[in-house]
Image (tube, rainbow, N blue to C red):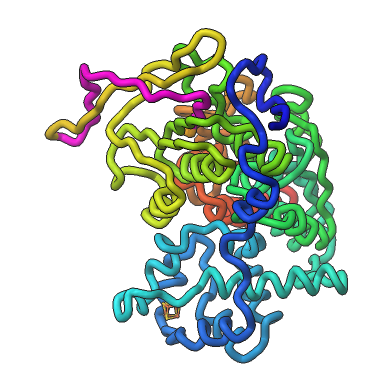
Amino acid sequence: MHDAPALNSKPDQSGLICGRLDPADLITAFADIHPCLTPDRADLAAARCYFCHDAPCIAACPTGIDIPGFIRAIATGNLAGAAQRILQANILGGSCARVCPTDILCEGACVRVTQEDKPVAIGALQRVATDHAMAHHAEAGTHPFTRASSSGRRVAIVGAGPAGLACAHALARAGHEAVIYEARDAPGGLNEYGIAAYKLTNDFAAREIDFILAIGGITLRTGQRLGDNLDLTTLRRDYDAVFLGLGQGWARLLELPGDALPGVMNAVDFIAHLRQHGPAATPVGRRVVVIGGGNTAIDAATQAKRLGAELVTIAYRRGRDDMGATPVEQDWALTNGVALRLWATPLAFEGDTAVTGARFACTSRDAHGALMIGADHFTLEADMVLKATGQSVALADADGLAHREGRILIDNITRATSLPGVFAGGDCVAGPDLTVHAVQHGKLAAAAIGRYLEATHG
Ligand code: SF4
C-alpha cells in the first residue's frame, strides 16, 4: 500500500489510497483503448467508403472535415494529403480522432450504418492520417501550414484549451500574432486535464500542442488567470482583439451539505490528477459514487474502476436516454463494471471525519416531462464521491461581460461578446461542450476576429 498524494486541499482522512492494483495491471488498464490501425486494416477500412457525393458524414462533423476526401487520399496511399484535408478543417484532428463520440457524429450519419449497421471507421482512419502527420512533424520538423505575411495585429487569447488553440492557430495562419494566456501550468485544457487517460496516451495532448505552436506567431504564457493576475481591461487596452476560450478551470459546481468532507471532490480534479500524475500515484476509494450523466462522469467512473475501486456507481437524476454521455460511452462504463443508479438526485454527503456515503432522493418525471423529487430517500455507501454535475463559469469579476447562468453571452454568428473587440467560445459559452465543438468555436472566432480587425484597423 502506498501513501496517497493529496488530491485536493482538504486534510485527507478518507480511505483513498494509491496502488489498489499492481503496477503491471495499472499499465494494462490505462493502455491506449483504440490503438492506431495497421496499414492493412486502414486499407480495408478505407475501401468500405462509398465517397458519397452529398456525404452526410461531413454535415455531421461539427468542424466540417472533408471525410470522403481524406479517406480517398488514404486509399491512394497519400497520408500527408489526408492529414492536410483533416487539419485544415480541424487543427486538433488528432485528438478529436481519439476522443470524439463518433457514434453520434460522423459515424452515426454514415450510410453504411443503414445498410450494414456498421459505419466506415472514420475516427480510426482520421487517426491514421493525423498520426502520420504528427510523426513526420516530429522527425522532420515540418508543418503542413505556413503563415500569411504579418498583419501587424496582436490578439490576446485567454485559455489554452481546444478553443483557444484552434483560434490561435487560425489567427497565426492569417498573419496575426496570438498570445495565449493560460491559468494552469500546462496548456491543453480539457484535452490535457479532462479526458480519460486511456483515450489520450503517450503525452499525445502535449505533442499535439507542440505541433500546433510550430506554425509560429503564437506565444504561450502559463500561470495567468483572469480575475487574478490578468484582467480583461488591460488585455483590451494592450491588444487589437481578445478571445476568451475559458474552460473548466473556471468551472465551479453546486455545493451540497457535507461537500467539504475529505473524499468528496470534483470529477474534473480527479481526472486531472490522474492525467498529470499517472494511475500509480492517483488515490481512489473502495466504494466510489460518481454524480452526473455526462462524458466526464463516465470517464471518472471508468477510471476509478480501472484504478481498482471495488464498487463504482454512477448516480444520475434522470433516465439513460437523458444522459449527456452517448450510448457507446454508457456501454463502455457498464462493460468496465460500473453500476448505474438512475432517477436519483443527491441531497447531501454523509460522514464525520471523511465521507461515508451519499444521500439521494428518488426522482421521477411528471406528465409534462418535468423532474419531480420524491419523498423516498436512500444512501449509497462511499469513501469517495466524484461530482460531475453541471458546471457554470465563475464570471463574478468578468469586467462587464454580459453573461447568463454562468455562460458568456455571444452572437452565435460573429462569436462577439457584449464588449467590442472581445470574442468567446468553448466551455464558457452555452451549447455543446465536446472538444470538436470547442475547436469549431475557435475557428469561427478567428475568422470573425479577422473581419473585425479588417473593419477597425484596415
Ligand atoms: Fe464514406 Fe460513410 Fe461518409 Fe459515405 S457517409 S462518404 S460511406 S464515410
> What residue is drawn where x is 66% and y is 45%?
22
Give the residue displayed 48% in from the left and 64% down from the top. 61
Pick the residue in front: 171 or 99. 99
Seen as rendered, the residue at the extreme bottom is: 76
Closer to the camera, 392 or 139?
A: 139
Q: Position of residue 150 (x, y in %)?
A: 84, 60
Q: Is residue 421 among what the camera can see?
A: no
149 relative position to 371: left or right: right
| Viewport quadrant of the C terminus | bottom right
Residue 381 percent location from the top left of the image: 42, 23
Q: Find residue 293 and report its image quarter.
A: top left
Whole-percent x, y for residue 387 in the image: 49, 29
Residue 371 colored in magenta in the image:
yes
* Main secondary structure of the magenta stretch: strand
Residue 337 versus residue 360 in the image, above or below: below
Residue at the (47%, 58%) spot, across then down: 101
Q: Nearer the viewer, residue 247 or 138?
A: 138
- Residue 172 is situated, as x and y percent measured from the top left of the image, at 77, 58
Q: Which residues are magenta?
A: 368-387
Q: Residue furthest right?
A: 140
Residue 349 visible somewhere in the drawing = yes
Relative to 10, does residue 442 appear above or below in the rendering? below
